[in-house]
Amino acid sequence: MNANQPNSFRNQPDEFGHFGQFGGRYVAETLMPLILELQREYEKAKTDPTFRDEFESLLEHYVGRPSPLYFAPRLTEELGGAQVWFKRDELNHTGAHKINNCIGQILLAIRMGKTRIIAETGAGQHGVATATVAARFGLPCVIYMGAKDVERQQPNVFRMRLLGAEVVPVESGARTLKDAMNDALRDWVANVHDTFYIIGTAAGPHPYPELVRDFQSVIGREARQQMLDRTGKLPDLLVAAIGGGSNAIGLFHPFLDDPDVKMLGIEAAGHGLDKEHAASLAGGRPGILHGNKTYLLQDEDGQIAEAHSISAGLDYPGIGPEHSWLKDIGRVEYDSVTDDEALEAFQLLCRTEGIIPALEPSHAIAAVARVAPRMGKDEIILANLCGRGDKDIFTVADALGVKL
Amino acid sequence: MSRLAAAFAKDRPALVTFVTAGDPTPDATPAILDALVEGGADVIELGMPFTDPMADGPAIQAANLRSLGAGTRTADILRIAGDFRSRHPDVPLVLMGYANPMTIRGADWFASECAQAGVDGVICVDIPPEEDGEIGPALRDCGISLIRLATPTTDAMRLPTVLNGSSGFLYYVSVAGITGTQQAALDTIEDAVGRLKSATDIPVAVGFGVRTPEQASDIAKVADGVVVGSALVELVARHGADAAGPVRDLTGMLAEAVHAAR
Ligand SMILES: Cc1ncc(COP(=O)(O)O)c(C=O)c1O
């Protein structure tokens, strides 16, 4: 590491929510007082043992943490290189890592006396997790979901409704995650007095990127200890898929100051980086959207481009600001995986390990399949298996030309 | 005296009108702007279309999409502004929009293009005072007013932060919500404007949810200016390239109501 590197990679953001030039609080004035109040409340909650106890107790008894750390023997053998391990966050209640963050945020909402919950969702995993915690705490809940995602994630739409949430299909723009976030922000502006917005990824105005990261860091903290307990060493490489970047930063953050641990974040290359895709770091430039400055897919005028990924959870033209910073300073490497590669990796994991992954972590698995053969058999890759694939079987069947 | 200051220094409340640039097409906008001036608008707000207008309701969202769908580029908007300035040397023109299109080539670039085009002020919805460095210094260096928004959630503690660096006028958003929503109750608006005016010397214009001459007149009794947007944008939606006539008529009625309010 060169002399320009900070002493620690783990003390971002600054008090204004900046990760280097990224992050910040780019919101309408109506929201600003609430954002500041949330920041104050989160600062207090962070050091409040009652808050921490309640968070940890719910993670253990309601979510089912710690999630296992699993060595994948047949996949390792098939790839013929580094040992492949998975952090099994797909075994969480509701089937993805999203619930970790939702537990933390709903506890904040209750602390702040808010009585109504809203959220945006792409794949529906965050929507399901939000609807779940809202039901658990008895708060009414409205989920904004792009109309296109409502079509391709029907099982999750039904789940949210079963859980008592109102699901609002968003017809504006490309009718996906970005547009759902716009409508959630519009709802929030009109209902700031009683409403808490549970943002589903490590993005948005400060303090969201920080608090989502902190709540998701349970993934990396557990994995780091589990890996030390099981192997006596740290992994050589971490791999995680990136939509907004919450499962990735949750895995990466506790390892950022371990200089020998390399990290690889995987964006969705969709049909290919020269065609429609969702890889904001690979194909975007810094800009301002949804409350933060970060890499965005956009044209020369700053108009936001429509993203594409087979995975609804990665189909977003931006990325959390901490990843933009980690990319620019070079601490984390970022690459991308196409729809086709992800589909292949999806089937590979089903076949070799008896695990049906979500399409989002299938992107990470495809990257593992790419790099593992080039690494030594004594090296360890730890990938985040951040969601299970039940929700995706219709999409996958469709892509494989199978009629259900 | 600056054009904005002059517009508010007349012995009557000011009418501020909003339309989206390039809606329905860049070619149609000049005639619509002229109609606003002919109808008696005192300040023109020209919306810069954005793909993700998070603070806007359905009417202005649709206007943004129509404009972008017609191929409107930032260069077109600056040209529309510059041509407006040539035709109307004395009518203040304010650009209103979102941070990304304004800052993507650098705030300095944007500010100097605005200055060259004769733009008097800029309203950026998603740059709060906390992020002033993103655009404020560049605008002030070019002598362009940064018009900030105050809202029902802007409390007394926070108001000085909002006012610091604001100029031209203060835009009071009368309801916590998006554009095109219901107007707030008149007595709460009167209270709020009173509080704002005791904290600043710059004029206070009130907007969000003002649609009719009656509403505009009521607000003009208590504020320095009244902003009307969605109602005009809806006329453009209905009449498209032929919107200038209807826009002139509504602006005329609004101006009459506002100017005669007190
Ligand atoms: C299983 C799963 N993984 C990943 C993501 C992407 O989000 P993030 O990058 O914040 O982890 C989603 C989003 O819906 C998801 O459902």
Image (cartoon, rainbow, N blue to C red):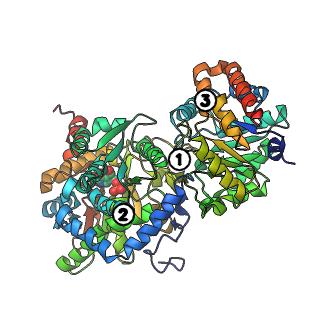
Q: CA distance from mark 1 to mark 3?
A: 18 Å
Assess disc 1: are there few (<14), some (14-19) or many (≥20) residues with their C-alpha within 10 Å of its C-alpha.
Answer: many
Residue type at numbered disc 3 = Ala
Q: Is residue A67 above or below residue B76?
A: below
In front: mark 2 or mark 1? 1
Q: Is residue B83 visible?
A: yes
Name the residue: 15% across, 51% down: A350
On whether disc 1 and disc 3 are found on a single subunit, the reply is yes
Query: In the drawing, does residue A328 fall left or right of residue B104?
Result: left
Marks 3,2: beta carbons within 8 A: no
Indicate the amino acid at tag 2.
Leu
Report which residue position mark 2 lands on: A108
Name the spot of residue B210 as percent of width and height, x first.
Answer: 61, 35
Element under label 1? loop
Q: Is residue A380 left or right of residue A314?
A: left
Where is residue A390 drawn, in percent x and y? Answer: 18, 46
